[in-house]
Amino acid sequence: MFLEAWVSYVRAIFKTETTWSLLEIKIPRQILRGPKAMEQIFSSLHTFIGGPSVWYDFYWDGEVQLWYSFEIASFGGDLHFYVKTPARHKNYVEANIYAQYPDVEIAEVEDYVSRMPSTYDALQQAGYELWGTELNLAKDDVYPIRLYEEFETPSEYSTLDPISSLIEVLNSIQPGEEIWLQILMAPANTSWQERGVRYIKDMQKSTRIVTESAEGKKVTVDRTPGEELALKAIEHNISKPGFQTMIRYVYLAPTTIYNKNTAWYGVLGSFNQYSSKAHNSFKHDSNVRTATEWFYYPFLFPTWRQEYRRRKIYSKFRERTMKESAFFTFLFTRMTLSPSHIILNTEELATIYHYPSNIVLTAPSIQRIESRKVSPPAKLPGQGKGAELPEGFRKK
């Protein structure tokens, strides 16, 4: 217990000393690149961010593996895209986004959560109410979700942008309502891929049926098409780098117009398009969701538990808190707010979060750039070090 307390203490110091930058991504009128471009960004970021390398960094300096937060915020239907990154990685993140989306504009902005009171109690005093949750996977995370390639067709007129459903939901809220969604991600090691390999071997053993024919010979019956599809999906899933991921969102509104249905059913419904029988699916984490009744576990003090969960999820969203390992928290995971930690690979992340292409119909809901920025010609006077200015020009 002392070791756990010490590690928590030094981690808190390390996090306090870490500076962060919030970047707003302004979308141009047309983006012709799809989720594949976003997958390239996530692949580049996977190998860049590091963590503690030796025991000294972990136990004495409290160093933790830092993470990124890719976010979408809807202010009364007005959509904005953000990336929160450690300040030391800001230039690298910008360079990777510009490399895949050269027409976007990136600006460092003030954190939008500071528009609201800093605590849930102060939020209530201001006349607002909150509903929030985290998303989990219905199956083991070695099973992939439905990927963006399955939304594409040879005809550009029938191709769907997977993020369009979420954009429509976020665009449908009234003025005064707000929905904030964040996808926290930190590079995962290869242990989840090794677990996936073991999972495949176990499935191959358990799903292969051996029977005896009338002649007494042993006959091997092939797996069903659904089982075969699931095996191929898992093999494809673990072939790409993965991120430790948390998906969290909150809905805020004045008590006079508060209606949690859009956040509860609408946002989850937009994530349901990524599910199928051979794949995984998203669901609310019942241990985190700010909906408690006497018939929900642990059945006691539902009002108190709801207030507690609202305070915790609001503070966790504002701080972009990422789950960390602990020695003794397993004793209390069902009684307290336990974060939903899942592994998603770069392709899965690009499916659920990318910048909307020109296929998305709700153009008025997104602040778009009406003009393009281009670099100046290479042979302008005064370009480069030591360049001589033409006669009549002077240096300031």
Image: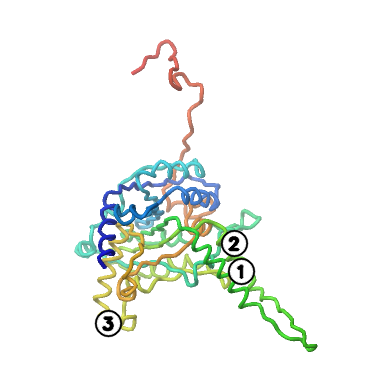
Q: Which residue is mark 1?
A: 231
Colour pattern: rainbow
Going by the image, does 125 lie left or right of 146? Answer: left
Q: Which residue is mark 3?
A: 300
Q: Can residue 255 be seen at all in this image of the molecule? A: no
38 vs 259, nearest the viewer: 38
- Mark 2 residue element: helix
Of callouts 2 and 1, the N-terminal one: 1
Seen at 37% across and 56% down, the residue is: 73
Amino acid type shown at disc 1: Leu
Q: Dot 1: within a 10 Å radius of its alpha carbon, few (fewer than 14), some, or many (20 or more) residues? A: some
Q: Dot 3: within a 10 Å radius of its alpha carbon, few (fewer than 14), some, or many (20 or more) residues? A: few
Point out residue 228 in the picture as x, y percentages from the top left corner: 64, 71
Q: Which residue is mark 2?
A: 236
The residue mark sitting in front, 3 or 2, is 2
Amino acid type shown at disc 3: Leu
* CA separation in Å, label 3 and label 2: 44 Å
The residue mark sitting in front, 3 or 1, is 1
- Mark 3 residue element: loop
* CA separation in Å, label 3 and label 1: 42 Å
* CA separation in Å, label 2 and label 1: 9 Å
Point out residue 90 in the picture as x, y percentages from the top left corner: 39, 43
Amino acid type shown at disc 2: His
Point out residue 375 in the picture as x, y percentages from the top left corner: 48, 31
Splitting the image into 4 quarters, where does residue 265 fall? bottom left
Point out residue 57 in the picture as x, y percentages from the top left corner: 34, 52
- The relative height of residue 395 versus residue 180 in the rendered view (above or below) is above
